[in-house]
């Protein structure tokens, strides 16, 4: 008989072309209720089944797109359960909507390995490039993207020689790719023509929008567990390099999206992310706020427009002197259908 320790994988355990699976997830109303309780997001279609049915012509409730992204991220974490931190997301596109009781199946592929440069006093780590594709129960592609976690090496001073080029990973989704996601048999009139808030202005390219409402991060491990995210650092403080539980990046992004919905409440859909870079760690009880710049607006023949936003999210926490110190934690480029 043998004793086995389930740990890792470490950087040396990866090879290009490896495929990682995960349990498929049926997104039930329970998922949507817990997500709503965690983020307080006011995106209208996921909240209003009657309005959603008018727009989508489907009697099932539509699932919040950020919940979909978080479930999929959770499905990818067998590859990154030993993560130090996720460095970036690229080219995330939501090819079709997800409705309550749809089942999501995700495959994660290793597409590149690059060991980080050695630094005095730091254990060896490496970047693992991952390509992710998710399909629904009809075998239709729902979502595709790339992300890059930083993973510790098994041997603290090892030199692996891994130095793959990540520059080929798309930095920007084309307007054709984005527009294809809006070619749905939807009637957007009930949403876009409804009077919502006369005090919220319309925006133009170049406008900078500061959202005054802030959120204190709570229930961070609960969102991690809801979405099957098994990254150690989010639930086990002893596995975090800060000796505190590291807030899952998707939690911070979800709160940032909920803040954006206060400024653009008639958003029809989240279409994709050009990219998202984590600029610093976020901890429980941090207070986060967001602001954004409208970088482009493309009017669609099918109705509405695609807004590309460059979002910066900031987190502040008390220092040892009892003063709040704020730092930038997210640089996020997303595209919404408005």
Image (cartoon, rainbow, N blue to C red):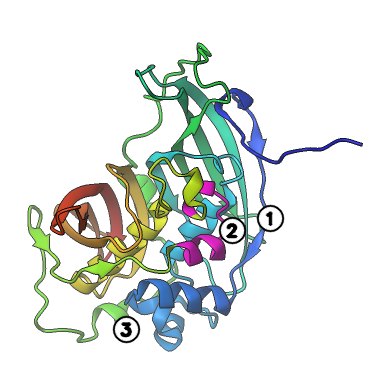
Q: Which residues are magenta?
A: 221-234
The quarter of the rendered structure image containing the C terminus is bottom left
Residue at x 65% of width, y 36% of height: 19
In front here: 193 or 166? 166
| Residue 214 occupies quadrant | bottom left
- For this view, does 1 lie left or right of residue 31? right
For the N terminus, which image quadrant?
top right
Q: Residue at x 28, y 44 (%)?
A: 280
Mark 2 to mark 3 CA distance (whole Å)? 35 Å
* CA neighbours of label 3 inside 10 A, class few (<14), some (14 to 19), many (20+): few
Mark 2 and 3 residues: CB-CB less than 8 Å, in contact? no
> Height in image: 144 above or below 335?
above
**Where residue 228 is drawn, which disc sits there?**
2
Element on which disc 3 rests = helix
Asked whether, in this view, residue 109 is left or right of residue 176, the answer is: right
Q: Main secondary structure of the magenta part?
A: helix
Q: What residue is rendered at 50% in x and 44% in y?
A: 239
Q: Are the residues flagged by discs 1 and 2 in contact, CB closer than 8 Å?
A: yes
Q: Secondary structure at mark 2?
A: loop
Gap in Å between the C-alphas at discs 3 and 1?
37 Å
Q: Is residue 73 magenta?
A: no
Of the numbered discs 1 and 2, the one sitting upstream in the chain is 1
Relative image position of residue 131 (x, y in whole percent): 52, 37
Residue identified by numbered label 3: 190
Dot 1 alpha-carbon crowd within 10 angstroms: few under 14, some 14 to 19, many 20 or more = few
**Where is 79 relative to 65, above or below?**
above
Q: Which mark is residue 23?
A: 1
């Amino acid at each position: 008989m043998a004793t086995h320790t389930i740990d890792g994988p470490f950087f040396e355990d990866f090879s290009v072309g490896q495929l990682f699976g995960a349990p498929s997830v049926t997104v039930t109303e329970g998922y949507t209720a817990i997500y709503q309780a965690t983020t307080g997001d006011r995106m209208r279609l996921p909240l209003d089944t009657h309005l959603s049915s008018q727009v989508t012509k489907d009697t099932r409730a539509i699932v919040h797109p950020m919940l979909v992204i978080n479930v999929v991220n959770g499905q990818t974490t067998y590859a990154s359960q030993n993560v130090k931190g996720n460095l970036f997301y690229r080219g995330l596109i939501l090819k079709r909507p997800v409705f309550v009781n749809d089942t999501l199946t995700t495959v994660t592929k290793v597409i590149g390995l690059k060991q980080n440069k050695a630094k005095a006093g730091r254990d060896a780590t490496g970047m693992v490039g991952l390509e992710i594709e998710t399909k629904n129960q009809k075998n239709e592609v729902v979502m595709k993207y790339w992300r890059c976690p930083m993973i510790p090496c098994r041997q603290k001073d090892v030199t692996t020689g891994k130095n793959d080029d990540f520059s080929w990973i798309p930095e920007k989704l084309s307007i054709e790719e984005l527009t294809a996601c809006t070619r749905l048999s939807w009637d957007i009139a009930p949403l876009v023509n409804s009077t919502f808030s006369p005090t919220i202005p319309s925006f133009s390219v170049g406008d900078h929008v500061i959202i005054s409402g802030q959120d204190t991060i709570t229930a961070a491990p609960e969102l991690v567990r809801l979405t099957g995210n098994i990254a150690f650092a989010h639930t086990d403080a002893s596995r975090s390099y800060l000796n505190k539980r590291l807030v899952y990046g998707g939690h911070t992004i979800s709160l940032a999206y909920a803040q954006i919905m206060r400024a653009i409440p008639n958003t029809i859909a989240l279409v994709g992310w050009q990219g998202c870079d984590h600029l610093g760690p976020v901890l429980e009880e941090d207070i986060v706020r967001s602001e954004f710049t409208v970088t482009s607006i493309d009017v669609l023949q099918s109705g509405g427009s695609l807004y590309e936003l460059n979002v910066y999210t900031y987190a502040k926490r008390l220092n040892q002197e009892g003063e709040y110190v704020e730092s930038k934690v997210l640089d996020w480029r997303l595209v919404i259908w408005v």
